[in-house]
Image (spheres, helix red, strand yellow):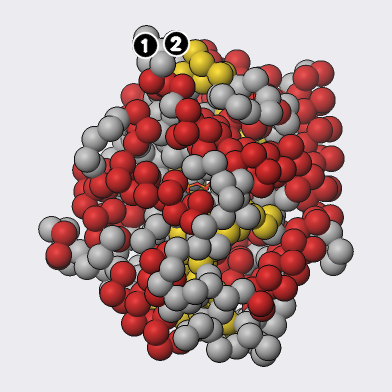
Amino acid sequence: MGSKNHDHQLHVVFFPFMAQGHVIPTIHMAKLFASKGTKVTILSTSHFIPFISKSIENNTSQIDIINIKFPAAEVGLPENVNSLHTIDPEMVQKFFQGCGKLAPQLDQILEKHRPNCLVADMFFPWANDVATKFGIPMLLFHGTCYFALCALASVFLHEPHKKISSDSEHFFIPDFPDKIELTASQIPDPLNYDDESESTKLFVTARKVESRCYGVIVNSFYELEPCYAEHYRNVVGRKAWQIGPLFLTERKTSNYDNQHECLKWLNSKKPNSVIYVSFGSMASFNDEQLMEIATGLEASGQQFIWVVKKEKKEGIKDEWLPEGFEERMKEKRLIIRGWAPQVSILQHEAVGGFVTHCGWNSTLESICVGVPMVTWPVAAEQFYNEKLVCQILRIGVEVGAKKWKRQVGDFVKREAITKAVSKIMEGEDAEEMRRRVKSLAEMGRNAIKEGGSSMLDLNALFHDLRSARIAPDSTHHQQNLL
Ligand code: UDP
């Protein structure tokens, strides 16, 4: 068997997890691959098909989309569920269970199309067995940085959080290039609990598959974290290619983004005078925390754009806004409901800081447009990303979040918010951070130029894929620690 296009055009199938933070970089990746002459197919569910179609509509090279049917009913979810966004937090485990039932559909697609490579999300570790059955190499895409991948591997292997007496006791990440201190309450839940939940099983399988699959694609660039790019390859022992910052390979932003009212508002503001506050597509806070954020931002005296997920109910007062806030802050703030054109906002010269949950896409976007951060990690690998930003790169200030929580963030007090926001916007430290992040931004831009580190890695990946053959139905082992 084996794939058929070895000497001709490469065909790569992308299978992202059904969440914005995974679909967005996959679209960038797919377009980048297509622009280099690769035939590309993206698999997704109906929730994302219109978004993906719109994102690729003016693309000159060939990108196909295949609609995957999510087996919602089979796992006891409402029929229309097929994206992580449309579900309540208590349904998440069932959603993961449903993902595990997508193998037969992937099997059919791979059998029919026989691509040269499958790029599958870390949430679909079972996809490696399906790909291997047809002799197709699988690349895993986690959507995070080398630093977090190294931290995840180390904590999984050495379990330092199980050798301490309380959740708040500090430990250092073992066998790690830098001294990085964490507590058990900051690392992902699946590592803390040896339970039988879907997320724990999934997490453990993903760790194992990471060492068995053909390799790993990383949305980062070498100059950002050289030490960790080396550590991941040489100590953790993975085969990896860094091909980012992927969002910078996108040539232009959409009309919707460019015409958003917030950009006109930003046009009236001085450079570096506005702080952007947003927590990605998943994290949401309760009313009490929203009130605390509003109060903390107001006390900082800074102008801000704040993205709030809660819908505006016509004629009904927002309980989470302090009395008189709207009136007092008229000139100083803009609250965006729902979805904001984040990259366009961050790119605007008026924006001088970003309060972020440290999702890797947001973090990388901030770095690559030269904006320092207030870090407020919530879940996933975000506490690791915070350490990279604040300790290694020194381009951010921690707000002081202490506890990993799926979706709903740890409570942070107004004083901490005011203090961190002021620190990032004013004073000598802020200037230093701004200078450092701007120099990283330039390195990021260079990485994706012809001859830049990420483009060289991408070419190396294409070269490898042209000759990649793995024996069908055998397990492809790399030299590694895990
Ligand atoms: N994003 C956006 N507008 C929003 C919220 C998010 O454009 O209102 C984009 C953001 O630019 C990033 C992605 O959605 O590309 C979020 O990914 P990230 O990894 O930061 O966080 P996640 O949503 O996965 O927690």
Ligand 1 under 8 Å from disc 2 Cβ: no
Q: Amino acid at mark 1?
A: Ser
In this picture, residue 161 sits left or right of residue 346: left
Q: Amino acid at mark 2?
A: Glu
Asked whether the beta carbons under mark 1 and mark 2 sit within 8 Å of each other, the answer is: yes
In this picture, residue 58 sits left or right of residue 97: right
293, above or below 208, in the image = above
Disc on res. 166: 1
Q: Kindly indicate the quadrant of the structure image that contains residue 245.
A: bottom right
For this rendering, which residue is in front, 278 or 227? 227
- Residue 113 in percent (x, y) is at 46, 87
At 73% from the left and 50% from the top, the residue drawn is: 221
Q: Secondary structure at mark 2?
A: loop
- Residue 88 in percent (x, y) is at 24, 47
Q: How would you rate the neighbour count of disc 1 (Cα within 10 Å): few for under 14, some for 14-19, many for 20 or more?
A: few
- Residue 409 in percent (x, y) is at 39, 30
| Res. 409 in view | no
Disc on res. 19: none
In this picture, residue 394 sits left or right of residue 284: right
At 26% from the left and 43% from the top, the residue drawn is: 89
In this picture, residue 225 sits left or right of residue 117: right
Disc on res. 169: 2
